[in-house]
Image: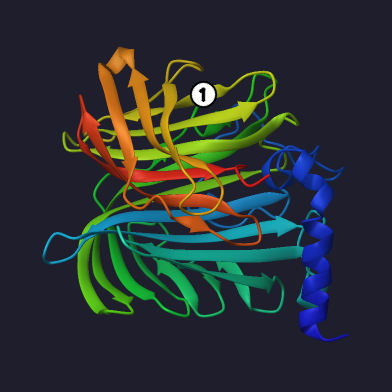
């Protein structure tokens, strides 16, 4: 059977349409027998946990960066590698049950470019390894040292490309309770940590020509087998960097039984404090259908315990990722009690 046909059949089985009713992209469906589930209190171990966890059903390496050109023009980029498993464990060659998917994007106030790659594990087309660290799908690469302190990031689509160097200026942040991140009142959870403090330099290639860029990068790492409750249809995810040096990761998971919000406050020195569920208030203020589906593109976020009351606005309301599982992802600008820049991801708005 041709490799492309095998890949297509595997993707169809793994991402079957009925799963959409069980949370965004099926992430609320019950983990099948044999898959591992996160255990509260299990410590994260590095560099091992920078690598893949084939005993879990889903996993991702997710990097965004807010950038600026020499004239101050703002840009944003995204690089993501997703791993999904047809069955727990790993095997060689075409017997591997691991399916890989890559997303890359480059966004400005006037344009949004994105690309998607699909791949199989076991045949060298895509994967992640440590010693030294490397994540790849086809010719897209995130590679560097095993501590994720220094990385080189490359990707290209039909009308864009980037080649960036990232150097961490702060510690890793363990989200939730030492890396155990609860996602619902029912207790669904994931293992989740971040490196939110990259200094970024490099080149962004657009149809108008190459642009030298500098800025800040944020890497999220997460894995689970059922991170959402069955009634949760999607999420609104914020990674925000303030001019004071502090940072905020926050999320709102939307469900028929009510929204679930949580997150982490990260001080300028990298000290992380988990938020109690409900402490973060996230209110959509304005929506746009510039990208097709109507999505909130201006928000008010409040965190009274940190005297935070801000408004967040999309740099480009049309930053829609028209990929296999479509979602909105783009850079945002922050005004109010705290100023800065960040990234917003919103899923589940295309149903």
* Residue 46 seen from this side: no
Local packing at callout 1 (Cα closer than 10 Å; few below 14, some 14-19, many 20+) is: many
For label 1, the residue is 261
Residue pictured at 28% horizontal, 27% vertical: 310
Residue 311's x, y, as percent?
30, 30
Q: How is the image coloured?
A: rainbow
Residue pictured at 39% horizontal, 57% vertical: 148
Up/down of 302 relative to 19, above or below? above
Quadrant location, the N terminus = bottom right
**Label 1 element class:** strand
Residue pictured at 51% horizontal, 55% vertical: 61
Residue pictured at 40% horizontal, 50% vertical: 317
In the figure, is residue 226 to the left or right of 264?
A: right
Quadrant location, the C terminus = top right
Front one among 304 and 333: 333
In the figure, is residue 51 to the left or right of 203?
A: right
Residue 170's x, y, as percent?
27, 44
Up/down of 264 relative to 147, above or below? above
Residue 90's x, y, as percent?
76, 63
Residue 244's x, y, as percent?
16, 33
Residue located farthest toward the bottom when viewing the structure as drawn: 2
* Residue 118 seen from this side: yes
Front one among 179 and 77: 77
Front one among 309 and 287: 287
Question: Number of marks in the image?
Answer: 1
Residue located farthest toward the left when viewing the structure as drawn: 71
Residue located farthest toward the top when viewing the structure as drawn: 305
Up/down of 2 relative to 51, above or below? below
């Amino acid at each position: 059977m041709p490799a492309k046909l095998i890949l297509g059949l595997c993707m169809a089985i793994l991402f079957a349409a009925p799963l959409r009713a069980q949370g965004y992209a099926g992430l609320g469906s019950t983990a099948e027998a044999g898959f591992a589930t996160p255990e509260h209190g299990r410590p994260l171990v590095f560099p091992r946990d920078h690598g893949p966890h084939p005993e879990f059903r889903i996993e991702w390496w997710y990097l965004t960066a807010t950038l600026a050109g020499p004239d101050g023009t703002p840009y944003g980029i995204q690089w993501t590698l997703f791993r999904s498993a047809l069955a727990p464990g790993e095997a060689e060659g075409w017997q591997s049950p691991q399916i890989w998917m890559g997303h890359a994007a480059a966004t400005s106030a006037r344009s949004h470019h994105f690309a998607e790659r699909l791949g199989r594990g076991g045949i060298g087309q895509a994967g992640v390894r440590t010693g030294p660290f490397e994540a790849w799908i086809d010719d897209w690469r995130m590679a560097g040292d095993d501590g994720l302190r220094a990385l080189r990031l490359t990707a290209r689509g039909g009308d864009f490309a980037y080649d960036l160097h990232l150097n961490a200026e702060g510690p890793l942040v363990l989200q939730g309770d030492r890396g155990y991140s609860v996602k619902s009142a029912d207790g669904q959870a994931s293992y989740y940590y971040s490196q939110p403090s990259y200094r970024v330099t490099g080149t962004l290639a657009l149809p108008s020509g190459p642009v030298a860029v500098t800025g800040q990068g944020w890497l999220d790492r997460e894995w689970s087998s059922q991170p959402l409750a069955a009634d949760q249809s999607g999420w609104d995810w914020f990674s925000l960097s303030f001019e004071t040096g502090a940072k905020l990761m926050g999320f709102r998971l939307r469900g028929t039984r009510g929204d679930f919000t949580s997150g982490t406050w990260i001080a300028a020195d990298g000290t992380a404090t988990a938020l109690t569920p409900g402490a973060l208030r996230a209110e959509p203020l304005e929506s746009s259908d510039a990208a097709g589906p109507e999505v909130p593109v201006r928000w008010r976020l409040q965190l009274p315990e940190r005297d935070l009351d801000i408004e967040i606005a999309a740099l480009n309301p049309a930053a829609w990722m028209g990929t296999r599982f479509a979602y909105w992802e783009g850079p945002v600008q922050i005004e109010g009690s705290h100023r800065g820049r960040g990234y917003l991801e919103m899923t589940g708005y295309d149903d």
